[in-house]
Image (cartoon, rainbow, N blue to C red):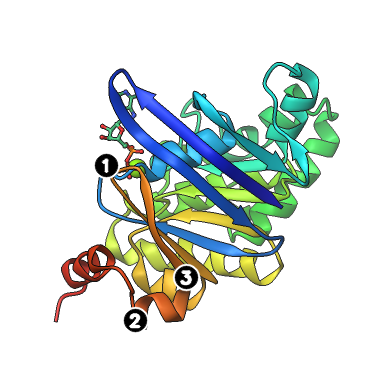
Amino acid sequence: MIKVEHLHKSFGDFKALKDISLEINDGEIVSLIGPSGSGKSTLLRCIHGLEKAESGKIWLDGELMDPSKKEQYAAQRKKMGFVFQHFNLFNNKTVLENCMLAQTSVLGKSETEAQATAMEYLTKVGMADKASSYPSRLSGGQKQRAAIARALCMNPEMMLFDEPTSALDPEMIKEVLDVMKDLGRQGMTMIVVTHEMGFARKVGNRVVFLESGEIIEQNESEAFFSNPSSERAKDFLSKVFYD
Ligand SMILES: Nc1ncnc2c1ncn2[C@@H]1O[C@H](COP(=O)(O)OP(=O)(O)O)[C@@H](O)[C@H]1O
Ligand SMILES: [Mg+2]
């Protein structure tokens, strides 16, 4: 579904991504893990086109993503939903309006159609009863579920999550992970930057471990957690698991 080849990204002299190559298949759930500053967000943002890589290629559904082909590139970007750590909801709009906005402005749907789709996905994430609430009245978990519904309203083929539960109080993490797990069960292709090792291990199919802008190791989730092959992954896991 997505193929990344020899991606390089620098910020000034600092190399944030060094020669990243990666393939993600249809329906796969890939967890991107690694220390803070290892380039996880940058990789996700490059895939989505929020950041421009200086070299390398990305294919989506076998089609090269080429920013110079503006219309095609915009259509490709629409196939990917992005969920941010801090939700990025519009605070002056209700949950329903947040979910309708891009449908009407980007997809050109009618208000009626956009509203029906919004309610369908809000129901799916258990937020239908909060449709007319403003984000400021919601808990973090509710905000994130609304943000997921908003992304789903665009009918993406794949979903990119950048630490979707890192800004949440502990008791709200599960309600968001459960929504993500359901999505995965329904066959959604997902790339998830996460520190939720339980989710990565049990729900994710594969782990990609990044450090200092490089893929150090990737493996099936269970194999990665039970038997990491690199010293750096072993060291990382020994730090994140307390026992
Ligand atoms: N816009 C930016 N300008 C300068 N440096 C950046 C920018 N975005 C990220 N970086 C740097 O790139 C590195 C990787 O960042 P990031 O992808 O956010 O890491 P992670 O998500 O794994 O914590 C970090 O050292 C970070 O400081
Ligand atoms: Mg990050």
Q: Nearer the viewer, residue 192 or 116?
A: 192
User: Residue 38 appears in which quarter of the rendering?
Assistant: top left
Question: Label 3 belongs to which residue?
Answer: 219
Q: Determine if residue 66 is in view.
A: yes
How far apart are the two marked residues, 2 and 1, measured between alpha carbons?
A: 24 Å
Specify the label residue 192 is tagged with. none
Quarter that holds the C terminus: bottom left
Identify which amino acid the numbered label 1 is placed on: Gly
**Element type at marker 3?**
strand
The Cα atoms of the two marked residues, 3 and 2, are separated by: 10 Å
Instruction: Find residue 23 and report its horizontal and vertical position in percent.
Output: 61, 54
Q: Residues within 10 Å of mark 2 (few under 14, many from 20)?
A: few
- Indicate the position of residue 216 as horizontal and vertical percent values: 36, 57
Whether ligand 1 has any atom under 8 Å from the Cβ at mark 2 is answered as: no
Label 2: which secondary element? loop
Q: Which residue is mark 2?
A: 227
Q: What residue is disc 1 on? A: 37
**Residue sitting at x 80%, y 45%:** 116
Image vertical order of residue 95 relative to residue 159, above or below: above
Ligand 2 is found in the corner quadrant, namely top left
Residue at x 66% of width, y 72% of height: 185
Q: Marks 1 and 3: which is nearer the front?
A: 3
Tell me where residue 139 appears, x and y as whole percent: 38, 50
Query: Does residue 106 appear left or right of residue 175 in this picture?
Result: right
Q: What's the amino acid at mark 2? A: Asn
Q: Is residue 55 left or right of residue 173?
A: right
Left or right side of 123 for 51: left
Task: Report how many numbered discs are placed on residues in the image.
Answer: 3
Q: Which badge, 1 or 3, comes first in the chain's sequence?
A: 1
Residue at x 40%, y 75% (from the top left corner): 224
